[in-house]
Amino acid sequence: MQLTVLSGAGISAESGVPTFRDVETGLWAKVDPYEISSAEGWRDHPEKVWAWYLWRHYLMQNVEPNNGHRAVAAWQDYAEVHVVTQNVDDLHERAGSRRVYHVHGSLFQFRCDRCEGEYRGELPAMPEPVEAVSPPECECGGLVRPNVVWFGEALPDDAWQKSVDAVTHADLVVVVGTSSIVYPAAGLPELALAQGIPVIEVNPERTPLSDAATVSMRETAAGALPGLLQRLPSLLG
Ligand code: BJW
Ligand code: ZN
């Protein structure tokens, strides 16, 4: 059996990583997403964007995978599991998942915004958010940026192709912890449904996917995923 998981920020929430859109605790409750997560924001005030990502980098290094990430990794004992994640953390890998496709990049890689060269220098620890930090300069005169995908930027080709393959060749797709509003990732479950592949959504809140999904569960990732395979016969009938 091939099982494909599409994850979003909600799967890491129970590890202590804030989601983006939660109105009280979400990352974007305090900053404007288009100022911080867009190419224009980087061009206009790179020091503000760099400071925010240094803080998130520190945060992600200092959290642990939760029972949601661990359940997905444990499914590898029973199925060929592919994980398509919008998250830039490494919690799926640290839980033991082997096929993980980061469609929005990784906050553990940094590159020059001009020559694309990888940056391997030390990063300052940033346990608290600060307003502005100048990003390191590359030898070519460009600035070092996180290797993540901002609004208006193309998704990495390789990860995207593998994700489309994984979703369209799956026997079951589990969509967990995403608001399902950011495209093109939000279109992946639609591809599966169009082919008659069942899609199970796990999210404590309703999303634009909820009505179309084969099953939509109002539960958290760490609560629902550990017992999900055992519940499949009753969920899918
Ligand atoms: C829990 C839980 C628990 C809480 N358990 N669940 C069509 C129409 C209009 C616009 C567009 C369109 N197609 C494309 C666009 C533009 C844009 C877009 O989609 N905009 C929409 C907002 C409308 N898309 C893009 O720009 C993309 N690029 C693109 O289209 O390029 C075209 C192109 C082609 C060729 C050349 C050039 C260009 C790029 C999108 C990049 C998104 N980047 C970000 C930042 C990444 C770096 C970083 O991490 O900082 O990705 S934005 C942000 O949103 C981040 C996330 O990956 C992404 C999705 O968020 P996610 O994961 O769903 O989080 P939340 O917070 O929204 O939701 C959390 C959910 O968890 C909630 O539902 C909770 O209920 C739930 N939850 N606790 C389970 N315990
Ligand atoms: Zn450079």
Image (tube, rainbow, N blue to C red):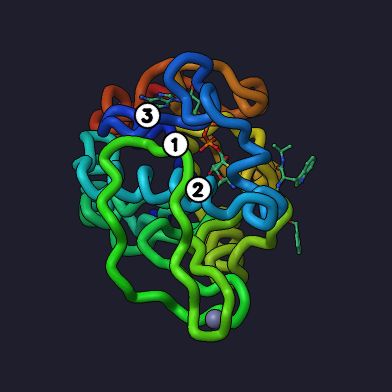
Q: Residue at the location (50% across, 20% down)? A: 22
Q: Is mark 3 on a helix, strand or loop?
A: helix
Tell me if residue 169 can be seen: no
The answer to whether 180 appears left or right of 148 in the picture is right
Identify the mark nearer the N-term, 1 or 3.
Answer: 1
Image quarter in which the N terminus is found: bottom left
Tell me if residue 52 can be seen: yes
Q: Are marks 1 and 2 in contact (CB under 8 Å)?
A: yes
The Cα atoms of the two marked residues, 1 and 3, are separated by 28 Å
Q: Can you tell which of label 1 and label 3 is closer to the viewer?
A: 1
Residue 165's spot in the image, x, y percent? 57, 63
Find out if the beta carbon at label 1 lies less than 8 Å from the nearest ligand 1 atom: yes
Q: Residues within 10 Å of mark 2 (few under 14, many from 20)?
A: many
Q: Mark number for residue 9?
A: 1
Q: Residue at the location (49% across, 37% down)? A: 175
Q: Check disc 2 and report the residue beneath it.
A: 86
Circle 3: residue type: Pro
Find out if the beta carbon at label 2 lies less than 8 Å from the nearest ligand 1 atom: yes
Circle 1: residue type: Ala
Q: What element carries label 1?
A: loop
Residue 77's spot in the image, x, y percent? 21, 54
Q: Residue at the location (60% across, 46% down)? A: 37
Q: Mark number for residue 233?
A: 3
